[in-house]
Image (cartoon, helix red, strand yellow):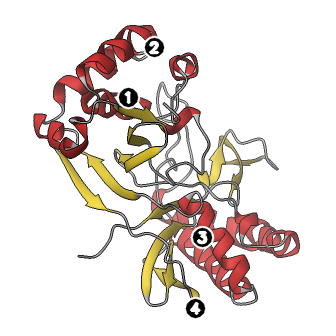
Amino acid sequence: MTYKHDHDKLIKNSNTGIEYEFAIAYLLMNPSQQTIFLNEVINHHQKTAKILDVIEAIDEKILLIGTQWKKLPDYYVSLKTTQDDTLGGPADVLLCSGKDTIHQGISIKFNNGNTWSPSGRHFLCDATISNLMMEYRTHYIPLHLQHMGEEHGACTYLENSHRTTYDRKRSKITDLFIDKIRNEVILAWGEKSLEDKLEILKLGYHEYVDIDCSILTLKKNGTYKMEEMQMIPKTINDIELVKRNTSQIEFVVDGITMGIMQVKPNGGFIQRDGKRNSFVVGECNYGEGDLFGSWNFEVVKKVL
């Protein structure tokens, strides 16, 4: 097995959603590999019960995936999480055989399709981010607090809770500032070479992929949807960024959308009990939001 995963590392892996990757990998294994994986990994993992619940809940039709390869005497399933990120692109589960053959990669999604969490610095220089933060600090935070006050009244802590009356309340000022960031991202993108643009797109796909990849989206009721992934073509003439909805940006490659990125603050536009340039709103403590630390990127399924 060239693409052998590391059982010890898998046992210690507590990444969000790892239980779904383990469950689907287990179901796609042949009986002998299932026994080993159950005894050496699942039964020693901190999420053992959850993994077993997911295995039990998933629609049994999933067993039909990879049928054409399961008959091979040297068929096996590999989890990519403990291996090289460039292996199999954004796939989480690899269906393999022999020493060096990957027949199919499967990217497992539950609740979201995120394959990469880029920072704003992948797209914007330090000077631009500094200027945006100054505007955020001096102009957009005051506007945000004014709008929240008009919509929700004074900011107070909820009874017997650390949450406040402003928590999970959306402000139109957030959308305005996110749109301003998007404008700067698109402006800076226009100044990049095609080679630099491609390098960034490849990060979302975890490099070029020479195998068939699919996106498996698992639902809470155990049913799933399997869709072929849109892959990066070998020849590219242009990569354009286009706004989508209030916070997203599409990566359009020669007219075809290949990826979607969400520009978002982590922990809210302002963070309750935040330590970054903290301030008081009413009777509640807040700090500046993390606006450029981690955005969301997802690859796009192929249009059939």
- Check disc 3: other Cα within 10 Å, few if <14, some if 14-19, many if 20+: many
How far apart are the alpha carbons under marks 1 and 2? 10 Å
Q: Are marks 2 and 4 in contact (CB under 8 Å)?
A: no
Give the residue number, with chain letter if any, for mark 1. 22
**Circle 4: element type:** loop
How far apart are the alpha carbons under marks 2 and 4? 47 Å
**Circle 1: element type:** helix
N-terminal of the pair, mark 2 or mark 4, is 2
Residue displayed at 69% across by 59% down? 119
Residue displayed at 49% across by 83% down? 252
Give the residue number, with chain letter if any, for mark 3. 201
Give percent across and percent down for residue 26: 31, 26
Give percent across and percent down for residue 140: 69, 71
**Circle 3: element type:** helix
Query: Height in image: 194 above or below 122?
Result: below
- Check disc 2: other Cα within 10 Å, few if <14, some if 14-19, many if 20+: some
Give the residue number, with chain letter if any, for mark 2. 45
Q: Are marks 1 and 2 in contact (CB under 8 Å)?
A: yes
**Circle 2: element type:** loop
